[in-house]
Amino acid sequence: MIEKMVKVNIVGPKKRLESVVSSLHRLKVLHITEHKKSDELDIGSPSKKAEKISRMLVEVSALVASLRLEASCRPEALGDGASIRKKLKEITKHVVRQQEELKALNERLASARSSGEKMLPFAGLSTPFEYYGGYECLVSFAGRAKDIPGLKHELHGNTMMEHAKDTLLLFADKASEEVCRTALKKHSFQALGYDPSWKHSPKQAIRDLEAEEKGIQARIARIQSSLNQVAEKSGNFLLALQAALKKELEKAEAPLKMGSTESAFFLSGWLPQARKEEVEKALAKETIHVVINEPGKKDTVPVKLRNSKTTQPFEFFMDLYSLPSYRELDPTLFLALTFPLFFGFIVGDIGYGLAGLLIAWYISKKIPGTKGFMKIIMVSSLMSLLFGVFFGEFFGEEEIMGIAMPHVLSRAHQMQELLYLAIAIGIIHINAALLIGFFNEKSHGISHAIFAKISWIILQIGVAVIALDLMGIISSSYLGYFIIGIAVLMLVKGEGINGIIELPGIFSNILSYARLMAIGLSSVSIALVINEFAAKWIEAGGLLAIGAVLLLVIGHGVNLALGYLGGFLHSLRLHYVEFFTKFFHGGGIAYRAFGEHK
């Protein structure tokens, strides 16, 4: 449900602004409406300390990021301003120095690794790098070539050559340079770059680089250990200071959301009606004027959802879609009731429901951040288990060890009845949406609500009467058409031409619920195929029996994942597309209490 809100207007002298802001920040209850500049009221200015707080917050946040601190901390007394600044300066100085050294070492390490990669092709050669070039009467070529023995034979004479595999080092006099280039080109020569500063033989140079890398890595490890010690010793202080600075900055910048004159400030916002007296009492001591009113029809009121612990996790779906507007009915309760129902209808298997329940429970324990979403999956899994009892299925089978499981409806053998049940669920769901829409539209007048929403229900009644007449259940040639005519006239009155255009839509929406049957049957079919193959392999014995176990585990695991994904997406679609479109407008603004950090 949506919590009732009241509008708050506060006017007071600027000398009381800081005190009022502190009180409201402590209460964590007021959703501030941002003021827009007008001829009468300018926008307020942040307090003088805002810039100083902002700079310190940037510094602390940079330290928190560089030390990779988790965004949580134990309560810690920070001390006075002087001691905080002193401690922060010491930490910053130490961390910055270590980070600069770390950056330089990483650059050296990257350079050493790059040089090592370039040296590797020369590892089989013995000629020291300092002899590779720098001659006046000789030219040198270092690189890779094909058929080096053939090249050596071709360039006999005024050349010297060393090679290892396809890497060669060739020296020739200046007069033979062009001949050498031609021959090298013929043998697909590719030059290898080397640094004139390299010394010693390639093997020795590579060993030197490896030793240098180890030394750099050791120094990096020592610095990282030192930073880890800083994080362990001062991390809680930094996180507590960051949280405190965020609060102080929020208070310092609060005037930017207010109206202002030379001597007074104006603040407007919203608060839950249940906390009205608490705010009045807290602000009574302030020399200000406070006016609290009920929302007007044209007011844009922020939305705060208030649901029980059972239904609250389903607010996740509203966050994905859109918050309801303040004057709409909150659909969270309906989602909590019907989403697991649809999910369970689709999956509908004792084995899959139990497996999904255990997996969701395990994930919620191991990853606390997923607890809310996993509650949805657990409730849906429980409903899948119950529908599994209804359908009499266990991992797709209706028999266990030759004993038939009791059931109300068999998905594998009563598909027509299953389809009728799915369509019946659709009719109930769609009409429930229309009744909710009727409730929402009452704010525009009861007659408008009847014409816009109840007309659709009357239309369905007319179609049902015609269907019963055609089946010979009742005898009524014209009553159904008369009811449809009345419904169409009401639609035109309530929704205009759009109502006529959308006439076929309601029946396609109802038929869309057939997916509850279709998606479930596809999962059953896959499960039966897996079981059939596994049974044949077990009969064959030997290694195939072991393969059958793997097939059952992997096959049903994949089918479980596909079934849960299909159940989730299609159940959600039926709500977003078929259900919500009948009543939901959305576009609500989330309630954000000043001083409440999430």
Image (cartoon, grey):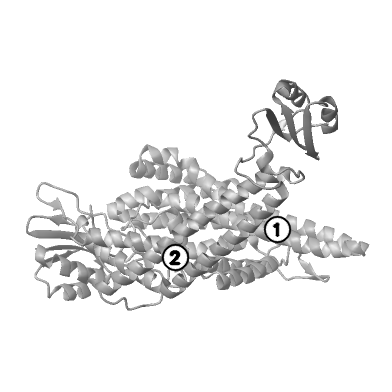
Q: Nearer the viewer, residue 153 or 291?
A: 153
Q: At x 45% / y 67%, what residue is drawn?
A: 69
* Residue identified by numbered label 1: 558
Quarter of the image with the C terminus is: bottom left
Q: Is residue 146 left or right of residue 516?
A: right
- Is 534 placed left or right of 73 in the picture? right
Tell which circle, 1 or 2, labels the residue nearer the N-terminal end. 2
In the rendered image, which quarter contains the N terminus? bottom left
Q: Is residue 312 above or below residue 563?
A: below
Tell whether label 2 touches label 1 (CB within 8 Å).
no
Q: How many marks?
A: 2
Where residue 531 sits in the image (x, y, percent)? Answer: 80, 61
Three-letter residue code for mark 2: Leu
Residue 206 sits above or below residue 232 on the image: above
Residue placed under numbered mark 2 in the picture: 333
| Secondary structure found at label 2 | helix
Q: Which amino acid is tagged 1? A: Val
In percent of width and height, residue 308 lies at: 42, 72
On screen, residue 169 versus residue 489, left or right, reads right
CA distance for labels 1 and 2 = 32 Å
Q: Which residue is rendered at x = 63% and y = 69% of the image?
A: 359
Q: Is 466 positioned to the left or the right of 134 in the image? A: left
Nearest the viewer among 306 and 466 is 306
* x then y, percent, for residue 596: 32, 67
Looking at the image, the residue that sits furthest to the front is: 137
Decide which of 478, 112 is in the foreground and name it.
Answer: 112
- Disc 2: CA contacts within 10 A as few (<14), some (14-19) or many (>=20): some
User: Can residue 504 be seen in this snapshot?
Assistant: yes
- Residue 166 visible in rendering: no
Quarter of the rendering containing residue 65? bottom left
